Image: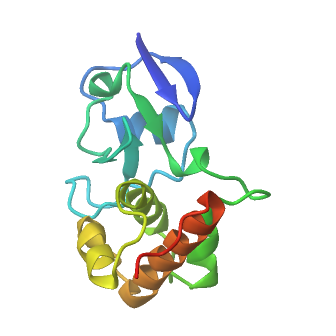
Amino acid sequence: MTMLKVNNRTLEVTSRPDRTLADVLRNDLGLIGVRVSCSEGECGSCTVLVGGEPCTSCLMLVNQAEGQDITTIEGIGSQDDLHPIQQAFIEEQGFQCAFCTPGFIMSAKAFLAENPNPTADEVSVAMSGNICRCGAYPYIVRSVLRAAEKLRKSSGQQAAE
């Protein structure tokens, strides 16, 4: 038995010790926003936040996540109340096929928590752990910059000169 805290809910899961966090989140808990593409930690599509840090959930065993706060794309907004990062990705068309988008958004969430006023170059470096096979990188960078602006406005911060 493993106790997981996922999206502010404590859940008990029964799992073999060799199962990944991504597998349990998707297949046992139905959190299909956790996308698995490479299963090798190279593409970032399975990125979730574990203890506030981005994590490639295809490489983490479910037991390693026990006792830590896990946040998936489903935990940051809803269809009726999008998170500012989600809204920014829509406004800037930061996707094409959108398979990679949840991983990018989760990486952006962690990055913007640390750097609320990034440059385009800083965004590019921060997002380098995620791969967009469609090549929507310029739109993704603009999306993260727009999200930063939205988050600053909502918290009352001003952009640095």
Residue 133 sits in which quadrant? Answer: bottom left
* Residue closest to the far front: 161
Q: Quadrant of the C terminus?
A: bottom left
Q: Residue furthest right?
A: 80
Q: Residue at x 40, y 47 (%)?
A: 48
62 horizontally vs 109: left or right: left
Is residue 150 shown above or below 112? Answer: below
Residue 156 is drawn in which quadrant? bottom right
Q: Is residue 42 left or right of 23 when viewed as pictured?
A: left
Residue under the point 46% across and 74% down:
144
Residue 83 position, x and y percent, is 63, 59
Residue 131 shows in the view = no
Q: Compared to 100, does 19 lie above or below?
A: above
**Residue 150 appears in the picture as rendered:** yes
Q: How many marks?
A: 0
Against 65, residue 89 (above or below) is below
For the point 59% across and 44% down, which residue is it? Answer: 75
Q: In the image, residue 43 lies at what x, y percent? A: 27, 64
Q: Residue 5 or 51: which is nearer the viewer? A: 51
Task: Reply above or below: 129 against 47.
Answer: below
Question: Which quadrant holds residue 85?
Answer: bottom right
Colour scheme used in the picture? rainbow
* Position in image of residue 142 (x %, y %): 46, 84
- Where's the N terminus, which quadrant? top left
Residue 126, x across and y down, in percent: 27, 68
Residue depicted at 53% across the width and 53% down the height? 33
